Structure formats: C-alpha cells, structure tokens
Amino acid sequence: MKITDVRIRLIPHGTRLRAIASVIFEDAFVVHDIKYLVGESGPYIVMPSRKMNDGSAKDIAHPINNLMRSHLLEKISEAYESKLVE
C-alpha cells in the first residue's frame, strides 16, 4: 500500500508529543490524528483511538503488522523532519 502524502501539525516542545500526522494512502484513504512522539528509545507513533467505558483505549485504525508500522513511522519521521526545516 503506497503512502501518497503525509501532513504534519507540529506541537510545541515540552513533552514527548512532537506532532500530529494525517497519512493519505493511494490518494484515496486518509487516517487522521496519528501521534508522533519521541521517547528515550527514539521516535514512535500512536494510532488514533477512542476511550472505552472501562477507561482503556482501543485503536480505531492501526497497522496489521510490524512492517507496515515501521513504514508508517519512517514516512511520518521524514515529514516531521522536513516540517522542522521549513
């Protein structure tokens, strides 16, 4: 599945959350509100979720395998770095 665009909204530094991403797939499908965070082990993403009645969170949309998660992280990281130099 081809990622055709990544749009980044920067978040002011002060927390691990650095940006919110919207990712467009195949110019036909978009996933909004993917959180881009930087922790002690490096950058990672958190997929959009909703709170359940028991207080837990359940992903609304998410990669099925680690290969796709890595691909998403790579593309979002590239877009984040590009946005920083604008």
Image: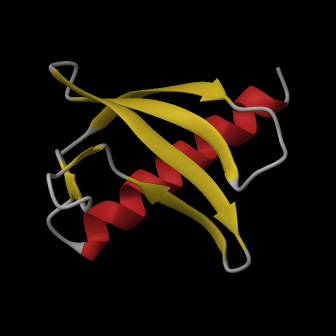
Res 67 → quadrant: bottom left
The colour mode here is secondary structure
Residue drawn at 17 percent across, 45 percent down: 60
User: Left or right of 29: which side holds 74?
Assistant: right
| Residue 40, horizontal then vertical, whole percent | 74, 77
Residue drawn at 21 percent across, 53 percent down: 59
| Residue 47, horizontal then vertical, whole percent | 34, 50
Task: Check the picture and name the quadrant holding the N terminus.
Answer: top left
**Is 15 rendered above or below residue 5?**
below
| Residue 71, horizontal then vertical, whole percent | 38, 58
User: Left or right of 82: which side holds 23?
Assistant: left
User: Left or right of 40: which side holds 46?
Assistant: left
| Residue 80, horizontal then vertical, whole percent | 66, 38
Task: Check the picture and name the quadrant holding the C terminus.
Answer: top right
- Residue farthest along the front direction in this orientation: 54
**Is 16 rendered above or below residue 60?**
below
Query: Closer to the camera, 81 or 14?
Result: 14
Res 54 → quadrant: bottom left
- Residue farthest along the bottom direction in this orientation: 41
User: Left or right of 75: which side holds 58?
Assistant: left
